[in-house]
Image (spheres, rainbow, N blue to C red):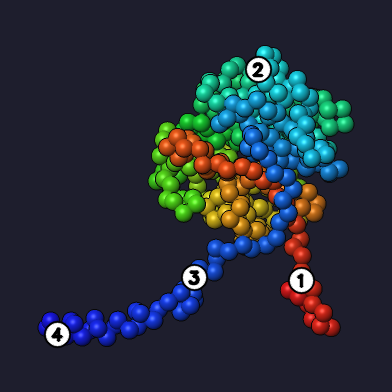
């Protein structure tokens, strides 16, 4: 018996000895390399970028929230001539002694409406502090005059002590003057959607207990090669409820997803904007759109493709109108893809390295600036081929 064991082991030894790097190369994962092309539009040191919006005329805006880092820089800036210009003014965007309702505290999500106006969600939180009265709010800024033309304060019962007003989209075709939809991903465990009527300023907290807004219990993701679990009140990664949000180009349907989930949901905007409907009625109109991977920011392009940021695989996915997915871009530098927006020709996305914050890494700050703002084409380029009649694709 011992002799047979010895011979078996001996007969395997030459094979094991020949299995060097060259022979083993075929076992390497082909799905981890770079895919697609992108441009680096801007690099940032200092505060990390989150939201991004690019207007039809090319003006570009980026937000720098203060809820994780109570920094002294602009919380909303216009990228102009290679610099970050506090927007709409230094008085509003930089820290000051103004009352919370009269300045920008911590701008997170930003978007533009179909009229070309800029909308921002101010989560109101400064790192290490409670959210004061009047700090959380929705603002509309007219880029022609660089002035605030709408302000909707988010107060109880819409606003909770642990609310994290995260991102927003605006449908001007829904309601008399339009409707704002906001995701409250929650700094605690009480996420929801917020609906705000622009004409009246009336707000309502909805779907606060519906599965479509909630983090998934037991959720786990692999982030930079490390297994990270969702543990309420003891975060190991970016986590929370309803977060990513996107409007179909015709504004007929709102898509959204919890941060700590792999599922995607949608609901008709006119149904969601009807503040006479209760959560039971709204919940019956929510459609489960299936899996979309881990995602933070979401956006649609004008062709109806949905883009989902994916912090688990350092990539951004493209979802076709029929539900099919493909890789738009993948690269090891696409860390914690966050805010995302579309112009006619380009998709822009911020890469703020949020998974490396001290709060997710036992107090160790793993962030290594510069942080990036990237873009890639809505319609991917096709390689050229000099052979007549042959395409390069």
The quadrant in which residue 198 appears is top right
Give the mark, 1 or 4, whose residue is nearer the N terminus.
4
How far apart in space, not on screen, are marks 3 and 4 (Cα)?
Answer: 36 Å
The earlier-in-sequence mark between 2 and 4 is 4
Nearer the camera: disc 3 or disc 2: 3
Which one is earlier in the sequence, the residue at label 1 or at label 3? 3
Q: Are marks 3 and 2 in contact (CB under 8 Å)?
A: no
Return the disc, 1 or 2, that comes first in the chain's sequence: 2
In this picture, residue 6 sits left or right of residue 287: left
Q: Position of residue 63 (x, y in %)?
A: 69, 35
- Contact, mark 2 vs mark 4 (Cβ under 8 Å): no
Q: Which numbered disc, 1 or 4, marks the residue closer to the eye?
A: 4
Mark 4 Cα within 10 Å, few/some/many (few <14, many 20+)?
few
Judging by the rendered image, the residue that carries numbered circle 1 is 383
Front residue (pair 149, 201): 149
Residue at which label 3 appears? 28
Foreground residue among 26 and 317:
26
Q: Nearer the viewer, mark 3 or mark 4?
A: 4
Are circles 1 and 2 on residues that touch, CB within 8 Å? Answer: no
- In three-dimensional space, the C-alpha distance between marks 1 and 3, rounded to whole angstroms, equals 26 Å
Q: Nearer the viewer, mark 1 or mark 2?
A: 1
Would residue 301 be visible to someone looking at this image?
Answer: no
Check whether the beta carbons of the residues at disc 1 and disc 3 lie within 8 A of each other: no
């Amino acid at each position: 018996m011992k002799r047979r064991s010895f011979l078996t082991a001996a007969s395997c030894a030459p094979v094991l000895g020949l299995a060097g790097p060259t022979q083993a190369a075929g076992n390497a994962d082909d799905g981890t390399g770079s895919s697609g092309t992108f441009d680096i539009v801007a690099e940032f040191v200092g505060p990390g970028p989150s939201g991004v919006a690019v207007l039809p005329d090319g003006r570009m805006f980026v937000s720098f929230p203060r809820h994780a880092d109570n920094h002294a820089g602009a919380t909303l800036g216009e990228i102009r001539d290679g610099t970050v210009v506090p927007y709409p003014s230094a008085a509003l965007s930089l820290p000051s002694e103004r009352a919370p309702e009269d300045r920008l505290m911590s701008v997170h999500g930003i978007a533009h409406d179909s009229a070309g106006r800029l909308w921002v969600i101010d989560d109101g939180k400064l790192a290490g502090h409670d959210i004061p009265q009047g700090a959380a709010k929705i603002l509309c800024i007219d880029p022609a005059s660089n002035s605030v033309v709408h302000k909707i304060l988010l107060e109880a019962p819409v606003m909770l002590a642990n609310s994290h007003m995260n991102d927003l989209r605006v449908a001007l075709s829904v309601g008399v003057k339009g409707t704002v939809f906001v995701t409250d991903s929650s700094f605690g465990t009480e996420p929801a959607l917020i609906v705000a009527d622009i004409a009246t300023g009336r707000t309502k907290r909805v779907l606060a207990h519906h599965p479509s807004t909630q983090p998934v219990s037991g959720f786990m993701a692999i982030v930079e090669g490390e297994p990270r679990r969702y543990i309420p009140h003891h975060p190991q990664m970016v986590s929370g409820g309803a977060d990513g949000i996107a409007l179909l180009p015709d504004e007929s349907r709102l898509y959204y997803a919890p941060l700590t989930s792999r599922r995607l949901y949608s609901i008709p905007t006119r149904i969601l904007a009807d503040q006479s409907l209760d959560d039971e009625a709204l919940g019956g109109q929510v459609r489960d759109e299936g899996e979309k991977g881990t995602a933070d920011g979401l956006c649609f392009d004008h062709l109806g493709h949905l883009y989902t940021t994916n912090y688990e695989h350092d990539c951004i996915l493209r979802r076709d109108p029929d539900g099919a997915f493909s890789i738009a871009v993948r690269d090891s530098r696409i860390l914690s893809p966050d805010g995302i927006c579309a112009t006619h020709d380009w998709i822009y996305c911020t890469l703020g390295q949020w998974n490396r914050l001290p709060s997710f890494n036992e107090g160790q700050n793993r962030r290594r600036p510069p942080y990036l703002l990237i873009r890639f084409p809505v319609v991917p380029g096709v390689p050229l081929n000099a052979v007549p009649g042959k395409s390069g694709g």
